[in-house]
């Protein structure tokens, strides 16, 4: 295992950075534990390994703007996954994946930028965006090595959204703060073969994209007390994030519908 990191200050408040590190993922207890009664674990299961490279540009401006824009490349050898063998789920080392993309973040304190101080409070607009291209580059299933229609090479890695977007606004004035956030997640596949149509038990198939909105407010009083309230999934969007083969499945793992909360806190 080794790694190296570097940083170059372009100005007092900005810098360029770059890193390289080798990765190692040992077999865990969950890898060796069947999730269902019909699951079979490969007795020759081996550890995963690879490396990661990332770099970018980050900094701040007038204490009102902060940002971080970077790219990465991740190589993942001996990836552990599940294939169907002899009619049963078989967990083994299924191949190599490569993930590459960009990740970015920017936050602007609009009132701070205009007034230069916090006299009117702070109104911050923020956004994060990531684009990830994750796919299989090597397929280690000897049973179908000569069948190009069943190869995983070029297929997308399961549960990796190509685009993830988050936008929000936060207003802070003395002991009052309010936040609104929108989250937009791209569609993903639930299995390595990128099955589009769900099966009868809903354990495989594409997971659609979804967009949800959340809002919350916090108000402090008498120095040591605070009140918090909020609503998650304001639009009551119906969505799901995973498909389970074993417990608590089989089937879809739905997200929560509209949920409201209220709390009173104290600090002594």
Image: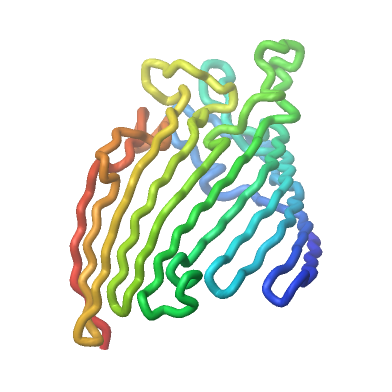
Q: How many marks?
A: 0
Q: Residue 127: x percent and y percent? A: 50, 53
Tell me how the rendering is colored. rainbow
Can you say whether 41 is above or below 193 in the image? Answer: below
- Residue 7 visible? The answer is yes
Can you say whether 218 is above or below 116 in the image? Answer: above
Depth order, front residue of 24/233: 233
Q: Quadrant of the N terminus?
A: bottom right
Can you say whether 157 is above or below 118 in the image? Answer: above
Q: Residue 261: x percent and y percent? A: 20, 58
Residue 22: name its quadrant: bottom right
Depth order, front residue of 60/157: 60
Considering every residue shown, the one lying at the far front of the view is: 114
- Residue 160 visible? The answer is no
Q: Quadrant of the C terminus?
A: bottom left
Instruction: Judge left or right: residue 219 versus residue 11.
Output: left
Depth order, front residue of 245/72: 72
Please report the residue visible at 26 percent of the width from the left and 69 percent of the height from the top. Answer: 218
Residue 211: name its quadrant: top left
Residue 237: name its quadrant: top left
Please report the residue visible at 61 percent of the width from the left and 70 percent of the height from the top. Answer: 61
Please report the residue visible at 57 percent of the width from the left and 56 percent of the height from the top. Answer: 105
Can you say whether 194 is above or below 100 in the image? Answer: above
Please report the residue visible at 24 percent of the width from the left and 73 percent of the height from the top. Answer: 219
Q: Residue 258: x percent and y percent? A: 23, 44
Q: Residue 125: x percent and y percent? A: 45, 59
């Amino acid at each position: 295992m080794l790694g190296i990191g570097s940083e170059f200050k372009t100005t007092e408040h900005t810098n360029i950075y770059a890193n390289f590190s080798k990765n190692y993922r040992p077999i865990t207890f969950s890898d060796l534990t069947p999730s269902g009664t019909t699951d079979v674990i490969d007795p020759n299961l081996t550890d995963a390994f690879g490396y990661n490279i990332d770099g970018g540009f980050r900094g701040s401006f007038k204490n009102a703007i902060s940002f971080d824009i970077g790219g990465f490349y991740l190589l993942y050898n001996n990836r552990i996954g599940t294939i169907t063998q002899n009619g049963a789920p078989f967990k083994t080392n299924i191949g190599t994946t490569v993930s590459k993309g960009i990740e970015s973040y920017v936050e602007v304190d609009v009132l701070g930028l205009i007034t230069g101080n916090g006299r009117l409070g702070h109104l911050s607009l923020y956004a994060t965006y990531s684009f990830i291209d994750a796919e299989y580059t090597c397929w280690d299933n000897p049973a179908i090595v000569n069948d190009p229609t069943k190869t995983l090479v070029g297929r997308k890695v399961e549960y990796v959204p190509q685009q993830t977007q988050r936008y929000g606004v936060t207003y802070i004035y003395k002991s009052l703060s309010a936040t609104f956030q929108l989250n937009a997640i791209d569609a993903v596949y639930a299995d390595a073969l990128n099955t589009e149509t769900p099966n009868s038990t809903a354990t495989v198939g594409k997971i659609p994209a979804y967009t949800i909105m959340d809002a919350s407010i916090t108000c402090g009083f008498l120095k040591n007390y605070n009140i918090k309230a909020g609503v998650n999934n304001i639009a009551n969007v119906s969505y799901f994030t995973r498909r389970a083969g074993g417990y608590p499945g089989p089937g879809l793992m739905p997200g929560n519908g509209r949920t409201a909360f209220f709390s009173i806190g104290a600090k002594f």
